[in-house]
Amino acid sequence: MSATWLRVGGGLAVFALIALAGLAALGGLEFDEALDTFTLVMVVAIPAGIATYALIEYAQTRRIDSITGQFDTRTLVLMPVAIALNIVLGTAVASALKIPIYFDSIGTILVAALAGPLAGAVTGFLANVIWTYLAPPPFGSPFAVPFAVVAVVVGLMAGTFARWGWLRPRPDSSGRRLLVGGAISIGAVVVMVVIALRAWLAAADGSSLAPKSDDTAFFILGWLVVLLVVGTAVGLVVLLVRRRDLAAAYILAAGVLTGIVAAFIAAPIAAGLFGGVTGSGADFVIAAFRRAGADLEQAVLGQSLISDPVDKVITYFVVYLILGAMATRTKARFPQGRYLLPLNESEDVRDRAAPER
Amino acid sequence: MSATAPLPSARAQGASPWHELDPLTRLVVALGTVAAALVLGGIVCLSLLAALTVLVPAAVARELREVLRLSLLLALPLGVSVVVVNVLFSPGTPAEGALLATGVVLRILTMAGAAVLFYRTTRPAELLASLQYHGVPSRATFVIHNGAAMIPRLAERAREVTEAQRARGLDTEGNLLRRGRGLVALAAPTVLGAMAEVETRTLALETRGFTRPGRPTLLWTPHDGPVQRLARWGVLLVLIVLVLEHLAGVLPC
């Protein structure tokens, strides 16, 4: 296990080093200064981190089994399906439903959960590239490629959470655990709401939250989004209480964490490249922030901090439902599938599985 | 896996010098254009970029009309949003917002143009063969090709599901709560159906030597040459120069 930690630690250290040094050298660490160079630095720092991981593993074992092991035939067959899912569902939600979420990372998180962080990252990356260059007409979007770096991070995070067993079903947990889980979920929701409100207040420049007469419609839309946040949370808590499934708490935590990180990576890209516009329902939220007097960067970050955690919590939840609908033997055959099984079942599988890589 | 016709020779299909280029070269130009559009700013620079890497090649390929039409269509919804958000809802003056919006719309158009030109002049199978010729592992090309080929099939499945659910009274209009609920009813059957196929396809591939090591024999080779190879590295070099220039801020781009 310590060998694994050395690789992960090395990769993270190189990533952080390059990211911080790059931002400091090119712009500055303040949010507004870093906007311009952020994407560029990420494009260099993330592959460098992954390469470091691979190099350390090669130095340790003369092979890179933990990486190649994530790409077995089954995963390679799943990846195209996942890519198509991302693109089709993302396009459908953006063009048909007009709600301020994206819903374009189900495939990424699904592959990451079943096969591993790198497989998820590759799926997310390829999905965005194919979305721009190879997707047939009604589905093509020239604007997906710059967000590939966000998809990579989402894949890496989702794979890691699944590897930690966060997507395991934990039905009929004991009362004490449920209490702790409930506390954690409520804490996560509070963090989410506080961040959303702070972003909102920052965007409104501390003036006031009271709707003005001429922009009531946008404020109502904004509040509906907040309502959706609360609604999702309540739904998960109901799952927690009724099914006594502790996994709800883990899903919420994973979704919020992934969403916040994704927001901080996606917002500079959207603000810097497209004037903050993504052509989806999220544009209304941005317009509301702008109307409230926020500058472009604040408006986009505010929108991302609201949309992304909600989007990711919903996505993780849907992936959890998909995984629940899959047969145990099907899941267990994927490289990382044993971490998705309930604990008592996975014990059996682990006895028969290949030794730890 | 998809039922594509055997690859035609590029020369027979290629009506123009642009079509005769190695698909990899065209991909590098398209990727380079998008990257450059992201790095560059300013109306003059973006117009120059669009003329040089999208309009001229499109004219050479005799696809100018189609490329213009499709990229306008693709960029239209996003463009309208950009203008609305930046001009009507900007806290600054409308003129400032309009200038910002023009730049962004131009960038969107350039990116759309590059993607459309590539898409219109390259068949996925052609690109994949070229990628394999240049040493990309067949497992990677399998994922890319099938990712693209799976989209219409999945969309077809999604359409069937949508119609079935509408027939049962699913409401895709209405307030946010209802739309949210509609999402699950549409996504779940679509996704589970697609997942069920994975098992079968895995077995089919494994019985057909998909996991066999070594490189498969290619029956088609792209028209590559030293000039094109040089041009591809040239695109990369120009991009690096552009990024450095952008960071140094010498030109007003």
Image: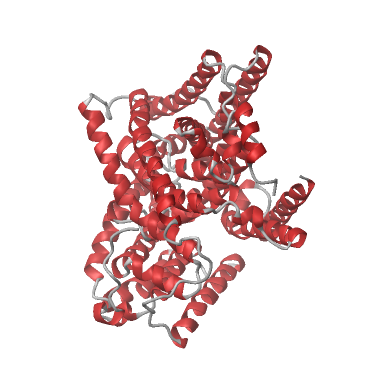
All told, the count of numbered labels is 0
What is the quadrant of residue A157 in the picture?
top right
Find residue A63 and report its horizontal and vertical position in percent. 69, 61
In terms of depth relative to the viewer, which is nearer, A259 or A210?
A259
In terms of depth relative to the viewer, which is nearer, A299 or A168?
A168
In the drawing, does residue B128 fall left or right of residue A180? left
In terms of depth relative to the viewer, which is nearer, A58 or A138?
A58
Q: Residue at left 24%, top 71%?
A: B63
Find residue A142 and report its horizontal and vertical position in percent. 38, 57
- Above or below for A176 versus B181: above
**Does residue A321 appear in the picture of this structure?**
yes
Q: Quadrant of the N terminus of chain A?
A: top right
What is the quadrant of residue B197 in the picture?
top left
What is the quadrant of residue A44 in the picture?
bottom right
Q: Residue at left 45%, top 53%?
A: A128
Find residue A356 and report its horizontal and vertical position in percent. 70, 46
- Above or below for A345 versus A49: above
Find residue A223 and report its horizontal and vertical position in percent. 44, 25
